[in-house]
Image: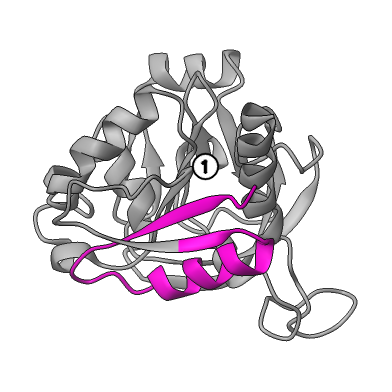
Amino acid sequence: MTVRIGVITWPGSLDDRDAQRAVRLAGAEPVALWHGSHDLESVDALVLPGGFSYGDYLRSGAIAALSPIMAEVKDAAAKGMPVLGICNGFQMLVEAHLLPGGLIRNEHQSFVRRDQKLIVEDTGSAWTNEFTQGQEIIIPLKNGEGGYIANDETLDRLEGEGLVAFRYAGVNPNGSLRDIAGVRNEAGNVVGLMPHPEHATEAGFGPNTAQAMRSGIDGLAFFTSAIAAVSRVAA
């Protein structure tokens, strides 16, 4: 079985091609999808990539969350399809109410770009099952509106129900509450995070590690996790 993972492009998407390449490197078939379409082309999973959809007008991800294809994304997510939102894609998922909370301008009011250490808090989702709980990974981060916020009740629920997927380690780059870098839904098929796993999937092009410059490939496990999850369902 060849797993097909759709990558949606919006006006202003920047990392859609990188996400397609990551899907290919993980061993699945990338399928390019367009924001104005209602056809998911029978894909098995979806990636909402990073960028500046619609120029980040209103709020980042707010307009994209109302685009035609998002109706299909919501329906597919409700039926259990794995959906990953990366950076701007994460912003779309919270604007579409597929994940709780919101993303606001970085606490220091500046765009940040760095190789970011994360702690894997959850391994029970479609996008994290090939990690180990507590694992430290390095994933590139680049955002201007990446501060994760939610009210105390929501934050307590996320913590209590194990829905925090990733947490910043070493430094909190954007003022996210409780150092939250990514969250998942209750079903475990929808995950969103601000760092960019698609930029850490090929040795020689990833973040620096203790072993060698640009050798980091921690992001590859996001995509192999989705392949494994889809394959288990199909078996």
Q: Position of residue 146 (x, y in %)?
A: 39, 54
Q: Residue at x 62, y 53 (%)?
A: 223
| Amino acid tagged 1 | Gly
- Nearest the camera: 234 or 61? 234
Please say whether residue 7 is one of the residues in the magenta stretch.
Answer: yes
Mark 1: few, some, or many residues within 10 Å (few <14, many ≥20)?
many
Please say whether residue 219 is one of the residues in the magenta stretch.
Answer: no
**Residue 98 appears in the rendering:** no
Q: Residue at x 61, y 52 (%)?
A: 2
| Quadrant of the rendered image containing residue 200 | bottom right
- Nearest the camera: 71 or 84? 71
| Quadrant of the rendered image containing residue 230 | top right
Most extreme residue toward the front is 1
**Residue 151 appears in the rendering:** yes
Q: Is residue 229 left or right of residue 96?
A: right
Q: Residue at x 30, y 39 (%)?
A: 73
Most extreme residue toward the left is 58
- Nearest the camera: 187 or 157? 187
Q: Position of residue 174 (x, y in %)?
A: 45, 56
Relative to 122, residue 228 above or below: below
The quadrant of the rendering that contains the C terminus is top right
Q: How many marks?
A: 1
- Nearest the camera: 87 or 72? 72
Label 1: which residue? 182
Q: Secondary structure at mark 1?
A: strand
Relative to 208, residue 232 above or below: above
Q: Residue at x 31, y 64 (%)?
A: 109
Q: Position of residue 183 (x, y in %)?
A: 50, 35
Magenta-tinted stretch: 1-30
Q: Is residue 74 left or right of residue 27?
A: left
